[in-house]
Every structure is written in C-alpha cells, then in structure tokens.
Image: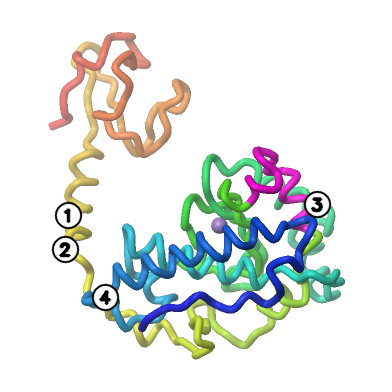
Amino acid sequence: MIYTLPPLPYATDALEPKMSQETIEYHYGRHLQTYVDNLNRLITGTPFENVPLETLILTSSGPIFNNAAQVWNHTFFFNSLSPSHTEMPSYLKDLLIRDFGSVDLFKEKFKKATIEIFGSGWAWLAQDKKGKLHIIQESNAGNPIRAGYKPLLNMDVWEHAYYIDYRNRRAAFVDNCWDLINWHKVASRMTEDITVAEYTDLEGNRVDVKETVTVEIEEEQEEEPAETKRNMERYVCIICGYIYDPEEGDPENGIAPGTPFEDLPADWTCPACGVGKEHFEKER
Ligand code: MN
C-alpha cells in the first residue's frame, strides 16, 4: 500500500489567523508529507508493505511505528479542525460533564495536559471500552489505540505545530486551536459503530485490525525481553543488606520506578546506610 498525503478538508488559509497559511503549508504540506514519504520508503519490501495503517501502529516499532503513527495522528488532527465555529453536540457535552465535572473543567484539564507534555507529543481525548472519556498524554508519535482506546480528539504539541505563529507560546496555541475544533467531528467519532481497533485507512476503506494483526515481528524486537530482564536485576548493599529493586526505584531520592541499577547516577548512595554504588552487588 502506497500512502498518499490525505486531503485537507479546508483551504490552507481557512484557519487564519489562529493557524496561519504558512503553518499549514509547513505542518501539513511538509511535515506530514515527509512522514508519508518516510513511511512508504520504510515499508517497501518488508512484511509491513501491505498492512493497514492502524495495524502498523499496533504491531510495528521504531521508525516504521513513528512514521505510521505520525501519518495517522496528523490526519486525525487536521480532520479535527474547522474554519467555521461549531457548537458541541449535547450528547458529547453530557459525557464531558459526567467524566470531567464540566465542559470548562475538561478544557482546563486538557489544556494542562498539553502544556505538561515534556518535549514533543500529543494530548488526546479518548474513550475506553466502557465508554468513559480520558485525557491521555503521549510522547512523540504515541497513539492511544495501542492501549485499546478510541481516540476522539488530539492536539499536536510538537513545536512544529505552533512555532511559526506562536513561537514558544504553546499555551496560546492551544487556546487558539481550541476555537478551531470541529466538535461535530469529535462527537461523530464517538458514535460511529466501530470497535476501538477498527478504523478507516486513508483511502476510506474500513479496516478490521483483529483480522489483520498477523505481521511477523522483526528480529530486533525479540532481543528486548532479555535486555529488560538483565537490566531489572536487584542489587544488594553489602554493607547493610538494603536491596535496590529497579521496579520500585528510589522515588524519595528522585529515582523513578523502572530505573535499572546500571542507570543510577554515579553519586547515588544507599538510602539505608549511605554508602556508594560500588558497595552493591547483584542479588544472587
Ligand atoms: Mn505535527
């Protein structure tokens, strides 16, 4: 399947002044085009070549995942905007009130989520399998369909989304972008009779991911569990017997859960007796 740049549902200058024509020309015309071109180049001649975009997102990793997800995320983003003001349908409003307290609180929480994403990424409004709405932060090309959610709305907070118009003012971009959201589109995604893992590809074909997830996993992925296991070994302080467990980390001293012993900073010391890392050995 050769992917092509999806059609933009409005003219490149239609979102002015909140989103300038220059931004659209770069963001849609260049960044998204580059993701499309990269994806085509990366999948050609691989088992991923004739796989629907959603399946790529669910089954690939590394550069193929990054470019596939960025094609999907951007298509979804540009389709979520409209040059004309839209009123939020009442059934969407009711669910936002149910799950966030009020529409204003939802906006506040969503905006906070966009601002707090460190570096590049996406904020999402997505529905879980029981229909509950969630605000989800994803780094880089992240997409909540990998965790079983149905996306309703996303907001691009990569710098390329706002730097031309807003420079470093991400919050101002989000405020202005908010007024461009096509709430009819957002709400229609909720009521479409589709499962979480079923979506249309860019050519408008319905895709049932459940039937197509039979992609061979690349060899490099097989090595990951062994690597993870090695790094997650527990270490014992030979002075006092304290055990460093990577799964727990050492949050009181700024070490996040999931930090391998090898990755502890050189000046990290035993939280129980204060000696350095050199006094630790692998738990036997
Ligand atoms: Mn972008």
Dot in front, 2 or 4: 4
Contact, CB < 8 Å: mark 1 with mark 2?
A: yes
Q: Amino acid at mark 3?
A: Leu
Q: Secondary structure at mark 1?
A: loop
Q: Secondary structure at mark 4?
A: loop
Q: Is residue 164 magenta?
A: yes
Q: Which residue is labeled 2 in the image?
A: 219
Please name the residue that numbered disc 4 is placed on. 44
**Amino acid type at image mark 1:** Glu
Name the front one of labels 3 and 2.
2
x and y percent of residue 83 in the render? 79, 69
Disc 1 from disc 4: Cα separation? 24 Å
Packing grade of label 2 (10 A; few <14, some 14-19, many >=20) is few
Q: In front of the other: label 1 or label 4?
A: 4
The mark total stands at 4
Amino acid carrying label 4: it is Thr
In x, y percent, where is residue 81?
Answer: 71, 68
Task: Choose mark 4 or mark 3, whichever is in front.
Answer: 4
Judging by the rendered image, the residue that carries numbered circle 1 is 223
